[in-house]
Image: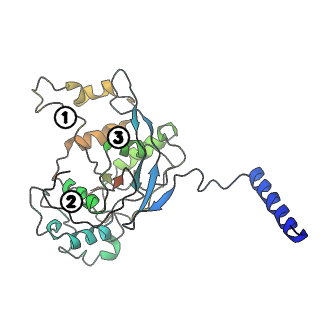
Amino acid sequence: MNKKEAKQLGWGWELLWIALLLGFPSKGFCQSPKRSDPSGSSMVKVDGGLYLPMFAGKVRKRERVNTFWIDQTAVTHQQFLAFVRANPRWRRSRISRLFAGPSYLQHWKNDLSLGPKANQLQNSPVTYVSWFPARYYCKWKGKRLPRTHEWEYMAMASQTRKQGQKEPGYLQRILAWYSKPTSHILPPVKSTYRNVWGIYDTHGLIWEWTLDFNNITLTGDARSDKALSRKLFCGAGSQGASNVNDYASFMRFAFRSSLQFHFTVANLGFRCASSSLPTNHGKKEPLGKKE
């Protein structure tokens, strides 16, 4: 090694020690890795961990959430338009009423046009979409809808903490959004905050479908069923809650339990998840194919 190379190596070590003393930039070290899946969407890795469900019962048993990947943003009108172009059976004029209500994609001009307000709509989250096309969109991308416990685990994070409930004002900000009326054209994705995982708009933009949205109160066929736990309904629902002050979670679970698979709502959209980064996308799925 000559003197010039030795001097350069010395400078390299000095810069490294300066960086260690001053601290590396937090960006990229505190947040989960972000990668682009083959479909072109950015997905964020959410490291698994223990999660206390909203209705944990007296035992307050924590559930383990396995590591998963989830889209950084909700699916937009532009992305969903590409889906219906490739999959004609999910177009507004062709979809069966078994799979979507009459308001399905009602703010589009027609099957393949967002209309005169396309510039405003294309990057805003798609809504008026029922569970069925949302699920098949995710399958088309080689993904799936997030499970409820995955969504809640991911969405409880604030901008600075993985457990945002411990941050002053966090729950109040969510409730303030719940109290606001829905605008006819929603703001674009990434218009609210990004949580500590690096995921945008978990609260403050839209409600989101989950794969098993209706399972929380599914213990019988009717309220008269002997197997049904009445503690899940009305005021009794708070008895088994893990945090009786988390009114925002109560509202989410109440909203989910009121939904049916074919419902289309003005502020209800979705994002996709995966147990690992998908390797196949854009694949047409038969309508009745079993999983």
Along the line of sight, the residue nearer the viewer: 40 or 53: 40
Q: Secondary structure at mark 1?
A: loop
Vertical position of residue 158 compared to residue 36: above or below = above
Mark closer to the chain start, 3 or 2: 2
Q: Position of residue 154 (x, y in %)?
A: 42, 46
| Mark 2 burial class by Cα count in 10 Å: few <14, some 14-19, many 20+ | many
| Mark 1 burial class by Cα count in 10 Å: few <14, some 14-19, many 20+ | few
* Residue behind mark 2: 133
Residue at the location (32% across, 30% down)?
A: 55
Q: Is residue 128 left or right of residue 27?
A: left
Q: Secondary structure at mark 3?
A: helix
Q: Position of residue 150 (x, y in %)?
A: 37, 44
Mark closer to the chain start, 1 or 3: 3
Tell me, yes or no, whether the two marked residues, 3 and 2, touch with CB atoms within 8 Å.
Answer: no
Mark closer to the chain start, 1 or 2: 2
* Residue behind mark 3: 149
Q: CA distance from mark 1 to mark 2?
A: 23 Å
